[in-house]
Image (tube, rainbow, N blue to C red):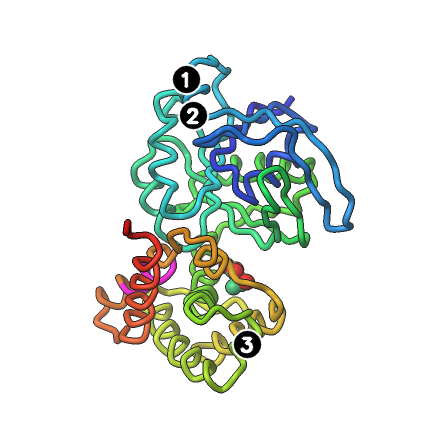
Amino acid sequence: MMTPHWILGPGAIGRLLAHSLSPIGDVTLVGRRALAEPQWLTTPEGERRLQRLNALTVDQLASEGLPAPGFVHITTKAMAAEAALESISNFIPSTTPLVLWQNGFLAQPRITQAWPGPVLNATTTQGAYLSGDAEVVHAGRGHTFIGDLHNRHPALAKTLVQTLAQAGFDATAVDDIRQRLWQKLAVNAAINPLVALHGVHNGELRGAEYSGRVASVITEVAMILQAEGIQPPNAGHGEDAWRALVWQVVDNTAGNKASMLQDVEARRPTERGAILGPLIESAQQHGLPCEVLQALDAELAALEASYLSPR
Ligand code: KPL
C-alpha cells in the first residue's frame, strides 16, 4: 500500500507526477489557487486522458485534516520552493521526507540544511508542459535520478524509485545526485540565459551571433566546476568535455523553447538565481573569473525588471 504523497506546485512536472501516481495510491496536489476540474493528460503517444486529481489549495489543506504524507514532493520553480514548504510546514511532521524537483542548486542545499527530516532530490529529463489551465502534455519520456546530497538515505531513495516505477516513471536511485544537479546546471547556464535574452530556440545558439558567447560561458563554467569537484558526465575532461556536452544538448533540443525563455515569455521571474547564482557564488569563493556569467545575470535581471516591476 503506497503511503500518501503530497505534490506541492501544480506546474507541468507536478501535474505529470499527480496524473502518474494517482492511479496507484493516495495523492494530493497542493497549490496556491484552485485548479480547473477535471484535468487532462496528453501522453507522449498523443492519447488524451481525463483524470480527476485530488487538488487542494494551501488554505483548504488546513481544514481537511488529511493523514500525514509519506512523501512531500516540491515541484515549484527553484526560487519558490522554500516559501512553498513554509506554507505547509504547519500541517506535516518535520520528519516527513521531502523530494525536491527543482532546477539549479539553490533550493537543494538550503532545504537539506534547514529541514529536520530526509531531503531527496530528483533530476529528470521528463519533458512536460502545461497547455492551458486543465491540461499537461507529457511531451517526451525521460529518466529521473533520485538521491540525497549526503548519501544518508539510500533506502528511502530506492523506495521512492520503486513507487515511481509503478507509476510509469523510469527512475534510478543514485549516490551522486550532487554531481548530477551541477552537471544539469552547467548545461542550463550555457543555454537558458542566452536563449531567454534573445528569444530564440535552443538550436539557434549555433548561429555566429551567439556561439562565441556560449563558448565564453563554457570557459568560465568549466573552471568553476573543476573547483567544485564536478566532472563532466561524458567521456573526456575539462572544458572540451563540457563544450561537447552543451552542443550535444543544443542539437538534441534544437527545436525547444528552453524553460527560461518560457518564463520570460510568460512574464514570470526566471531561475537565474538558481542557475547562475550558485556558479557566480562559487567563482567568487574560489577567486575565479565570472564576468560573462555576471553580465548574463545582470541582463536577465534588467529584463525581468522590465516586466515584473509595477508601472
Ligand atoms: O533543460 C533545459 C531547459 O529548458 O531548462 C534545456 C536542456 C536547456 C532544454 O531546453
- Identify the magenta region: 275-280
x and y percentages locating residue 47 in the rendered image: 78, 44
When asked about the image quadrant of residue 250, the answer is bottom right
Tell whether 289 sits left or right of 30. left
Residue type at tag 2: Val
Residue type at tag 1: Ala
Q: Secondary structure at mark 3?
A: helix
Tell whether 303 sits left or right of 204. left
Q: At x 38% / y 59%, what residue is drawn? A: 275
x and y percentages locating residue 168 in the rendered image: 70, 41
Tell me if mark 2 has few (under 14), some (14-19) or many (20+) residues whose alpha carbon lies within 10 angstroms of its own.
Answer: some
**Residue labelled with disc 1:** 62
Q: Which is closer to the viewer, label 3 or label 1?
A: 3
Of residues 73 and 63, the one drawn nearer to the viewer in this rendering? 63
Of residues 116 and 59, the one drawn nearer to the viewer in this rendering? 59
**Residue labelled with disc 2:** 58
**Residue labelled with disc 3:** 204
Main SS, magenta residues: helix
